[in-house]
Image (cartoon, rainbow, N blue to C red):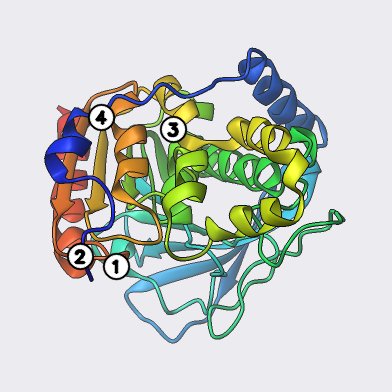
């Protein structure tokens, strides 16, 4: 697993100048306003998981265009609210899975919202949220769905889902709205950055080896999917390079990152062929709020694994304790 991108010293010195659409804020203000005006109310249905120390609810939240987005809510059984909350977004190809599978944050004493990923979730990582939009001309995968018009982008829909899910978490009676953190690995890391940029007042964000950052560079240098989907698409549509990258700039988490102001804990892996470290550092350096960083020099896309979960647990505990003081 060799070093295939910039060195750590070069990444630490990196200050990329990314193209930002002139109407970026208006684009997202309109998108989120349309989603809220579509109406709908979050629903929470108790689920018997067989676990005695965690109480779980099947969640449905109105996301993009008011469409139902599924998820899970885990609460420590018998806990007195309101609780600090961790909202988690999932990696590429992952759905919410089974209700008993991910209970770390509830076992740590927090409310834990897990958002399903529309249209994703194959193999054992089952998903229950369809992507109802139709598009044509894309290569297999999600990055090039609607890639020639920002309003048609798959990730416009998914970023909207993430923002609405974070808003629903803050409104839940078991949750302290002033102590909500968003997090995720890879695609989930990009979604957490987007949510932090689009939802004011979050307590923190933990992007873990984030995808969807400096997308153009990712398409140029990544040695493994999903960024390679863009290269494949443009190898077929040679005349659409500027059109595609202009559209994708609306959903580039590194472009959105300066708008996020919540405290953050990033993780970046220096031998990551999926999300090259220079792309992750682009988001880190452009991030608009207080930021901390853990670098895993000899890891690939798995990043820090259990070691980084330990770092996150300590970081969230300190963050939430400080907010109570």
Q: Name the residue tied to disc 1.
A: 302
Q: Nearer the viewer, mark 3 or mark 4?
A: 4
Q: Name the residue tied to disc 3.
A: 254
Real-space CA distance between mark 1 and mark 4, rounded to the nearest whole angstrom: 23 Å
How many C-alpha atoms fall within 10 Å of the one at disc 4: few (<14), some, or many (≥20)?
A: some
Vertical placement of 23 versus 314: above or below?
A: above
Q: Name the residue tied to disc 4.
A: 14
**For residue 171, which quarter of the picture?**
top right
Q: Earlier in the sequence, mark 4 or mark 2?
A: 4
Left or right side of 45 for 92: left
Residue at (73% x, 33% y) in the render = 243
How many C-alpha atoms fall within 10 Å of the one at disc 1: few (<14), some, or many (≥20)?
A: some
Tag 4 near tag 2, CB within 8 Å: no
Q: Give the structural element (helix, strand or loop) at label 3.
A: helix
Q: Position of residue 305 (x, y in %)?
A: 23, 67
Q: Earlier in the sequence, mark 1 or mark 4?
A: 4
Q: Name the residue tied to disc 2.
A: 299
């Amino acid at each position: 697993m060799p070093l295939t991108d910039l060195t750590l010293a070069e990444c630490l010195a990196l200050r990329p100048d990314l193209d930002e659409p002139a109407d970026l804020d208006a684009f997202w203000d309109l998108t989120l306003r349309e989603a809220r005006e579509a109406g709908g109310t979050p629903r929470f249905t108790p689920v018997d998981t067989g676990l005695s120390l965690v109480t779980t609810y099947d969640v449905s939240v109105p996301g993009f265009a008011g469409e139902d987005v599924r998820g899970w809510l885990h609460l420590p059984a018998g806990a007195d609210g309101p609780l600090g909350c961790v909202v988690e977004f999932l990696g590429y190809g992952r759905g919410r899975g089974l209700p008993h599978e991910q209970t770390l944050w509830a076992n740590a004493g927090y409310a834990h919202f897990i958002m399903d990923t529309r249209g994703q979730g194959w193999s054992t990582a089952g998903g229950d949220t369809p992507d109802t939009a139709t598009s044509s001309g894309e290569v297999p995968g999600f990055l090039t769905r609607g890639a020639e018009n920002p309003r048609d982008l798959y990730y416009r829909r998914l970023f909207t889902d993430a923002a609405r899910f974070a808003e629903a978490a803050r409104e839940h009676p078991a949750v302290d709205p002033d102590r909500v953190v968003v997090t995720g690995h890879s695609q989930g890391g990009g979604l957490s950055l987007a949510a932090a940029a689009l939802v004011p007042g979050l307590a923190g964000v933990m992007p873990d080896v984030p995808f969807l950052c400096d997308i153009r560079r990712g398409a140029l240098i990544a040695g493994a999917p999903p960024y390679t989907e863009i290269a494949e698409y443009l190898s077929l549509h040679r005349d659409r390079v500027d059109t595609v990258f202009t559209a994708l700039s609306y959903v580039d988490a590194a472009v959105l990152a300066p708008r996020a102001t919540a405290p953050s804990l990033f993780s970046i892996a220096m031998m990551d062929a999926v999300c090259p470290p220079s792309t992750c550092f682009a988001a880190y350096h452009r991030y608009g709020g207080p930021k901390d960083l853990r670098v895993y020099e000899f890891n690939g896309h798995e990043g820090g694994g259990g070691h980084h979960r330990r770092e996150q647990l300590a970081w969230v505990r300190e963050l939430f304790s400080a907010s109570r003081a």
